[in-house]
Amino acid sequence: YPCNLSDFVGSNRVPLNLNWKPPSWGGETNVMGAIAAAVIDDIDLLLTGGRLHSTNKEILEQVYDETVQGGGDDNSALKAVLQHYGAVPEFHITNNLVDSSSTTEVRPVPDISTPTTPVPVQGYKAIVYLYMAGAADSFSMLAPKDGCSLRNQYEVVRGDISIPSNDLLPIDVSTSSNQQPCNNFGLHPSLVNIAQIYNANEGAWFANIGPLVEALNKEEFQAGSKPVPVALFAHNTQTHVTQSVFSQDSSTGGVLGRIGDAINAQEGEEIFDGYSISGTPKLLEGAPGVSRPADVITGSGVSSFNFLAEASEAKVLALASNIVTSIHGETFSNAMTNAIYRMNYLDGVLGESTLNEQACFDGLDSGIANQLEQVARIILKRDELEAKRDSFYTEIGGFDTHSDNGPVLTDLLSQIDDAVGCFRSEMDSQGIWGNVTIISASEFGRTLTSNGLGTDHAWGGNHFILGGSVRGGRIHGDFPSDLTDTGNLNIGRGRLIPTTPWEGAWTGLSEWFGVSNENMATVLPNIGNFEANIFAEEDLFG
């Protein structure tokens, strides 16, 4: 527990001191002139069981002494040491950093530099994953219009959350991969730009897509005769399942992480880069030690140390400067070192770069717009970054609309549509739109029926794929032909069993990105379980 908690009430600061004083202070709460080595020994015993390596002890002693020499008292020096302790590798492991029979060697500085004269990258491609966290009501995103035999069912089943036919933005689905129940569909009225992209044959939809272990019908689900994804309808688990595309195991890595591992292995070099503009998602996780971890930045740009921590960067690097024998300590130190150098490198490359469509982004005020702006900046600098395959994770939350489906969904979809419109314009101006693909996703769909205020957790949903090379103007998969309770996909309250697995979308995406047929079963472990609605590159692109 922190001491002097009242000092922090109403502030955004986090107290960095423990309610503990080193025994070497002799019981005093703040003794002047304490010996740094004795204090570090006390902290070492408390936090790392006496396992601090001698070089790291010396570094922490320097932190203590430099704080006092700079005018701070011993209490301030103790805080400074504790601030650095999170970067001490011994704090994150349970064994000794270096075994007794070994010596350390200095870690080489990562070879990360910007080419003086960048060579234009040939064959560049990027996948942008747009995740709608909370479970989007995607049957309000894509819906039947008047003139469709399903329209009456849609209005009856959806009730107060039905989107009026005249409000839906019309799209032509007559060239769809599969025969749909009718040709008269429309998009949510907020999706103006996405409708334009679709009608320009640069966008398509996946109908009733969701996580599956294998193809499943209503009778099999009710009888429990076939496996289903773990923890259906649970946000956290289904987020992992959707992003891993391995429905029976939510602990495995992410599908884009596996794609990156496969492509790097095929090429014999690292040509794949992953970027998250929103946290550390499952999607970009590859096998440990195979490919470089994804870079994490924010909607404001590269997330560097704050002004207080910048002064500690040299000491943090020093704490990780030796190659050690503990595999866990070495993993931590190597990751810490690479992250700092990579962060500084990206900050230098991206800098204050201005986009061609900067005014478009500046006119928006949403998190997803800021994220797609950063994606556009990285793509703009693809030659300097020597990128060949880039993958991006973006996220917008708030879709768990149990009690406020209408206005909240309208606002969220408007934010997405505005951001996608600016992003598409920027990619066009860079001459790279044909090399970029956006795919949307959510952990599951929502019930067709209303609970009186909103909708609840369901299963299958509808999602879009956009890009200059996308074979657009079509719906992939099967939009349900019966939305009623007696429908062969409805397992209650309009929870629809998906007819297209996520493997159906990721097969063609993986092939377009460069994954070989030999590696497809590694990238998509369940691909052999499906025969229908698996879409190849030629189905999705052309």
Image (spheres, rainbow, N blue to C red):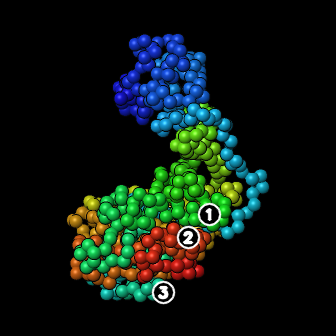
Residue 425 % position (x, y): 58, 66
Residue 282 spot, x, y in % from top left = 46, 57
Numbered badge on residue 519 = 2
Left or right of residue 495: residue 114: right
Q: Which quadrant, please, contains the C terminus?
A: bottom right
**Is 81 left or right of 146, judged from the image as shown?**
right
Asked whether 404 or 237 is in front, the reply is: 237
- Sequence-earlier tag: 3 or 2: 3
The structure residue drawn at horizontal position 52% and vertical position 79%, both measured from the top left corner, is 536
Q: How crowded is mark 3: few (under 14 residues within 10 Å), some or many (20 or more)?
A: some
Which amino acid type corresponds to the residue marked 2 in the rendered image? Asn
In the rendered view, would you say 73 is above or below 445? above
Which quarter of the picture shows residue 503?
bottom left
Q: Position of residue 87 (x, y in %)?
A: 53, 36
* Amino acid type, label 3: Thr
Instruction: For residue 516, say whether it is visible.
Output: yes
Front position in the image: 365 or 298:
298
Q: What element carries label 2?
A: helix
Badge 2 density bin: few <14, some 14–19, many ≥20, Cα 10 Å: some
As displayed, is residue 428 above or below residue 476?
Answer: above
Mark carried by residue 265: 1
